[in-house]
Image: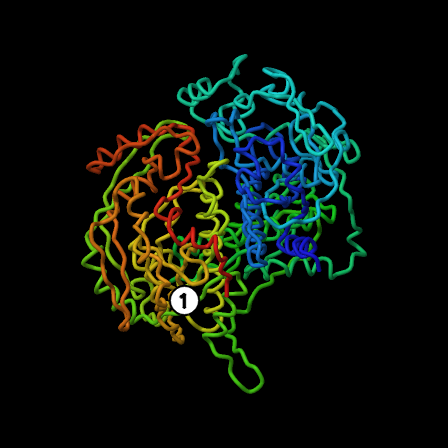
């Protein structure tokens, strides 16, 4: 099977509705700083994937008022799903021996002109344009990518690779968009009729795609900045106007883009004013449910369990009406509600589990909604209303009352038989013939099936030995924690508190703990090699890696805990077991930093410590993230990892990690640790100084200067007062989507060494 067909199968299995391929030559007219070749000079192909926005979520979203999002809010889950697709396809390519740079779905931009890049709201690459490059779409009058299948009701994501893959044919201009002008007519900010500065011309292959060159600040008034659309909008909209409105009136909330809502290509455009003001999309498939094969529905309802769901409850609209829940308010003509949930074990209910379970449930609901939508049934999910239905459905089931449930609901016009499906909760045994399967190997195999690149096991005794040596270094260290009390897009209003660090061991999370399972996920090699480098000077792909690996590890942590629970054991997932790391600022909020769980990974035999305090593994050097699963299962310990002579590259280095630290956070002496007779060395950091750069983004060299931030403050004495004063200097817009690229990591000799020989996962 060709690489192209392998990628198609892989992407569709993950939930993509569309996938296309374009050669890099099609991008030759793109500005270098937001082009695939600018991000990855070795690039040969762009791979673009899309998922369909469930039609009813668009048609009902913003129908009463553009800033009444309703079910259109599912787009947030769609973005997260696209992020998962992007990362996973890049991993597939890297395992196959190719380089790949996965791009984030959204929310990483250069808001203002940066050096030679004469653009605002500029992403690393435009998925709208890349969808055209990959032969999936054309550009409509509204400037949105329109596909023949779904019109504008798609969201896209891009992976750039050095694999040379046969490209798909382009869709000529005018194929999909018929210039009906409904987008212009219904735009509440008149962004398609006012302040138009000629045309934008997108040159791809033999074609020119033309559309209005609109003022993006006007376009972003409600959709991005949440300014009340009922307020007067000036004839000329600038950043200053928007910030003044936010300062005076606050924000109302995000807008359902009316240029998308009212855009339905002619061949699929129908109207039903009793359902929605905007046109409806005529479905390509509409089945007769009375004669549909039962396997069609059964497969759809079985799929969420494969994704990690453990409760599925189908309730009829009539039954819910008898309990005071009117599905008609959420979806006219609704027949059924399908509630999906994950039960939270009492000891596992930490942030990591709740976050991972929320992603799993929301992804399962999105896929279920799209599967029902594809059969021709109007379906919605992931709105305030569907979550309220979830709460009422779950609270009405007696045997779930003592559980905390992470849940969400899909509401559909398809009539499904009322039912409840789920795991009986019985304990399992695993046998091959007459021999009981080794529990440790079963757990490791299961972890790999969840996508973990690295798996190791440590006994709790190793943590006790390490903790005794780490407490004199970390116990009592003061950490400054800042909370922003200001409204979004207003200057920082910091509230600073002080926390005191305490080294922890597995027993602090789970009394009776016996083992710790440590799982690792790769950061992609091509991303770390190219971050901040010309021509693109981009940090976005690296920032994306830091949060997507955290989310994926949390989701895997949930499923690992559930598997251990099935086997009769207790478990809890932890982001930084020994509590010696910190957080990195991210467009998706603070993420556990890449030193998190370093001592857990050391104890689990996955690698060894570098001088900068990162873990180096033989498979990936220092480019990975870890999550730890503490359990009372007694598992076979992995051997401690001892680097071979010459393997530890720090011995050959002039400590560029320490020299490149913009806040001089590294201590002037190293610490030696021993564990089971093996010795490891690292250099501690001053937590406040390190956080100044990566948690609070006050040092430009830690990545923020590459998106146009002018904040670069010398870290002298760091106090609550100096931190608060520094935070107040952040740009009120840029601070909402900060990116960070830690010099001590991206300039490390281990990253450069990989240019000579690419390690493979085992």
Q: Please give left or right for residue 689 compared with residue 537 in the image.
A: left
Report the colour scheme: rainbow
Classify 110 as above or below 374. Answer: above
Residue at the far top in the pictured view: 235
**Residue 443 x/y as whole percent:** 48, 71
Element at label 1: strand
Residue 71 position in % (x across, y down) = 59, 39
Percent coordinates x, y for residue 385 in the rendering: 55, 42
Determine which residue is flagged by label 1. 517
162 vs 180, left or right, is: left
Query: Between 415 and 554, which is closer to the camera in this rendering?
Result: 554
Q: Quadrant of residue 539?
A: top left
| Quadrant of the rendering where the N terminus is positioned | bottom right
Residue 140 image-quadrant placement? top right
User: Is residue 298 found left or right of 119 in the rendered image?
Assistant: right
Residue in the picture at 21% in, 47% down: 478
In this rendering, is residue 474 above or below 447?
above
């Amino acid at each position: 099977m060709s690489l192209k067909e392998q990628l198609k199968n892989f992407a569709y299995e993950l939930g993509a509705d569309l996938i296309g391929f374009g050669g890099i030559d099609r991008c030759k007219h793109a500005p270098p700083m937001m082009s695939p070749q600018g991000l990855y000079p070795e690039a040969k192909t762009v791979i673009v994937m899309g998922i369909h926005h469930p039609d009813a979520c668009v048609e009902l979203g913003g129908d009463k008022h553009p800033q009444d999002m309703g079910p259109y809010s599912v787009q947030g889950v769609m973005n997260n799903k696209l992020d998962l697709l992007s990362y996973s396809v890049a991993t597939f390519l890297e395992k196959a021996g190719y380089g790949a740079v996965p791009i984030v779905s959204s929310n990483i931009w250069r808001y203002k002109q940066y050096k030679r890049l004469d653009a605002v709201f500029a992403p690393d690459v435009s998925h709208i344009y890349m969808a055209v490059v990959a032969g999936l779409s054309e550009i409509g009058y509204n400037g949105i990518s329109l596909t023949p299948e779904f019109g504008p009701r798609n969201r896209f994501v891009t992976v750039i690779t050095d694999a040379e893959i046969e490209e798909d044919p382009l869709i000529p201009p005018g194929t999909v968009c018929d210039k009906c002008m409904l987008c212009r007519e219904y735009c509440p900010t008149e962004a398609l009729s006012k302040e138009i500065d000629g045309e934008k011309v997108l040159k791809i292959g033999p074609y020119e795609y033309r559309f209005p060159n609109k003022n993006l600040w006007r376009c972003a008034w409600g959709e991005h900045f949440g300014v009340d659309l009922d307020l007067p909008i000036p004839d000329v909209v600038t950043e200053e106007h928007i910030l003044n409105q936010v300062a005076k009136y606050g924000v109302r909330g995000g807008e359902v883009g009316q240029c998308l809502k009212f855009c339905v290509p002619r061949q699929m455009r129908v109207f039903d004013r009793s359902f929605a003001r905007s046109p409806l999309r005529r479905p390509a498939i509409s089945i007769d449910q009375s004669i549909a094969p039962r396997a069609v529905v059964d497969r759809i309802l079985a799929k969420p369990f494969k994704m990690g769901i453990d409760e599925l409850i189908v309730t009829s609209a009539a039954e819910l009406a008898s309990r005071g829940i009117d599905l008609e308010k959420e979806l006219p003509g609704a027949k059924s509600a399908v509630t999906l949930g994950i039960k939270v074990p009492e000891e596992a209910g930490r942030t990591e589990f709740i976050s991972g379970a929320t992603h799993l449930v929301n992804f399962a609901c999105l896929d279920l909604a799209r599967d029902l939508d594809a059969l021709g049934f109007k379906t919605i999910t992931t709105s305030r209303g569907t979550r309220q239905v979830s709460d009422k459905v779950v609270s009405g089931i007696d045997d779930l009352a003592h559980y905390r449930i992470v849940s969400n609901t899909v509401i559909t016009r398809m009539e499904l038989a009322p039912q409840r499906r789920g795991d009986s909760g019985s304990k399992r045994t695993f046998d091959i013939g007459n021999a009981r399967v080794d529990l440790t190997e079963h757990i490791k195999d299961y972890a790999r099936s969840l996508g973990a690149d690295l798996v190791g096991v440590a006994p709790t005794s190793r943590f006790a030995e390490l903790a005794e040596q780490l407490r004199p270094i970390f116990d009592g260290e003061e950490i400054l924690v800042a909370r922003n009390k200001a409204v979004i897009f207003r200057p920082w209003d910091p509230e600073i508190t002080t926390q005191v660090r305490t080294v922890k061991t597995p027993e602090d999370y789970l009394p009776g703990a016996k083992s710790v399972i440590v799982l690792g996920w790769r950061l992609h090699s091509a991303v770390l090699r190219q971050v901040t480098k010309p021509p693109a000077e981009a940090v976005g792909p690296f920032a994306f890696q830091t949060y997507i690996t955290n989310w994926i590890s949390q989701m895997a942590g949930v499923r690992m805990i559930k598997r251990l629970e099935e086997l009769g054991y207790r478990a809890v997932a932890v982001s930084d077991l020994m509590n010696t790391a910190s957080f990195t600022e991210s467009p998706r909020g603070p993420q556990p930093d890449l030193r998190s769980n370093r001592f857990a990974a050391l104890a689990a035999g996955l690698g060894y410590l570098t001088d900068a305090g990162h873990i180096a593994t033989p498979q990936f050097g220092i480019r990975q993230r870890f999550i730890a699963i503490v359990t009372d299962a007694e598992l076979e310990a992995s051997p401690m990892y001892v680097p071979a002579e010459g393997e530890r590259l720090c011995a050959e280095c002039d400590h560029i990690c320490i020299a490149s630290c913009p806040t001089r956070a590294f201590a002037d002496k190293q610490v030696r640790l021993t564990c089971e007779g093996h010795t490891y060395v690292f250099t501690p950091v001053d937590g406040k100084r390190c956080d100044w750069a990566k948690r609070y983004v006050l040092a430009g060299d830690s990545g923020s200067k590459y998106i146009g931030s002018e904040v670069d403050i010398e870290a002298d004495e760091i106090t609550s007062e100096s931190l608060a004063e520094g935070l107040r200097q952040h740009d009120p817009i840029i601070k909402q989507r900060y990116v960070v690229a830690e010099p001590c990591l991206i300039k490390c000799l281990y990253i450069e060494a990989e240019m000579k020989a690419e390690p493979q996962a085992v």
